[in-house]
Image (cartoon, rainbow, N blue to C red):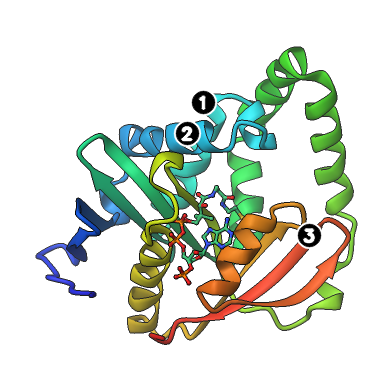
Amino acid sequence: MTHYDGGDSGTERLDTQHKGQELRFTIIPPQDVNAVSAGQLAALHEKNFPDYYLTQLGTPLLTSFYLHFLSHPNNLCVIATGASGVDGLALFVDDYDTQMAAFYRKYWRSLVVGILRGFLRHPARVLVGTFKRVAGLFSHDSVIVPNLPRVTLLSIVVESSIRGKGLGRELVQTGTAALSARGVSTYYLSVVATNTAAIAFYEKIGLAIVSQTGRKVLMVGTTDED
Ligand SMILES: CC(C)(COP(=O)(O)OP(=O)(O)OC[C@H]1O[C@@H](n2cnc3c(N)ncnc32)[C@H](O)[C@@H]1OP(=O)(O)O)[C@@H](O)C(=O)NCCC(=O)NCCS
């Protein structure tokens, strides 16, 4: 069940009994974002994506990443908070390429430091990850799928101990309901082909694969209630 109570600052909140567990679903207003809230999400990301490239580059850069995307007024981040803190997040981003380029411009020094630090800890992984991203700047995936929606689901994660209880679905649905209210009807995401669990989850909640190029699968979903 979805219910927004609104608020003076436009904050949208949803409280729900979630299969016996009290969880609060909150859409973080950009003006409330600070290093602490970004740090909490970075910590959840680090814990649940230990092998991801960005995680290898260290906590300060990851925190800057969340700070950057959470602060943008067109983005939308839903978090689920339980007794032990943040249990899940879904971050929707508008015009990802432009915002990512702005991130690189703003944080290029931290990025260089992160790559150097990460290289000392995990040389092979960081070298390969950096190479892939630089090579990706010159690839032409967008030619293969020319009409992707503007909004992307950039990050979704549910604390490992409470997966499979409907929390991921509810995070996405809370986000898509709010996007729909903003006039956004579709969104896309990119997932590595080896993450078959996530692809199965996305298909279950209604997204469809629109393209697979090498290691990357692109999927599209609608914001309609199902
Ligand atoms: C992907 C993820 C967010 C799903 O969250 P979740 O809370 O476990 O998912 P839900 O319980 O809401 O599941 C919704 C539906 O997807 C299905 N599903 C979830 N995980 C699945 C899996 N591993 N394999 C097959 N189906 C799965 C559920 O069975 C459910 O279907 P149903 O409603 O028909 O029963 C969570 O597993 C996660 O955080 N994974 C690690 C991070 C990650 O890989 N993120 C994606 C990066 S692109």
Residue 192 is situated, as x and y percent measured from the top left of the image, at: 73, 54
Which residue is disc 1 drawn over? 60
Q: Secondary structure at mark 3?
A: strand
Quadrant of the snapshot with the N terminus: bottom left
Q: Which label sits in the foreground, 1 or 3? A: 3
Instruction: Name which residue type carries label 1.
Output: Pro
At x 22% / y 52%, what residue is drawn?
23
| Residue corresponding to mark 2 | 63
Say if mark 2 contacts mark 1, CB within 8 Å. Answer: yes
Q: Residues within 10 Å of mark 1 (few under 14, many from 20)?
A: some
Dot 1 falls on a residue whose secondary structure is helix
Left or right of 108, for residue 124: right
**Mark sitting earlier along the chain (3/2):** 2
Of pointers 1 and 3, the one earlier in the residue sequence: 1
Q: Say what amino acid the circle numbered 3 marks.
A: Lys
- The mark found on residue 216 in the picture is 3
Residue at 62 percent of width and 65 percent of height: 200
Task: Decide which of 168, 68 is in the foreground and name it.
Answer: 168
Question: Label 1 vs label 3: CA separation?
Answer: 27 Å
Left or right: 61, with 52 as reference point: left
Determine the residue located farthest toward the top in the rendered image: 120
Q: Residue at x 63, y 52 (%)?
A: 100
| Mark 2 CB within 8 Å of ligand 1 | no
Q: Give residue 66's position: percent from left, percent from top.
A: 47, 43
**Crowdedness near tag 2: few (<14), some (14–19) or many (≥20) residues, C-alpha within 10 Å:** many
Q: Is residue 103 left or right of residue 164?
A: right
Q: Give the distance between the C-alpha atoms of the residues marked 3 and 2, in whole angstroms.
A: 25 Å
Helix, strand or loop at label 2? It is helix
Q: Report, in whole angstroms, how far the alpha carbon at label 2 lies from the one at label 1.
A: 5 Å
- Name the amino acid, label 2: Thr
The x and y percentages for residue 77 are 39, 57
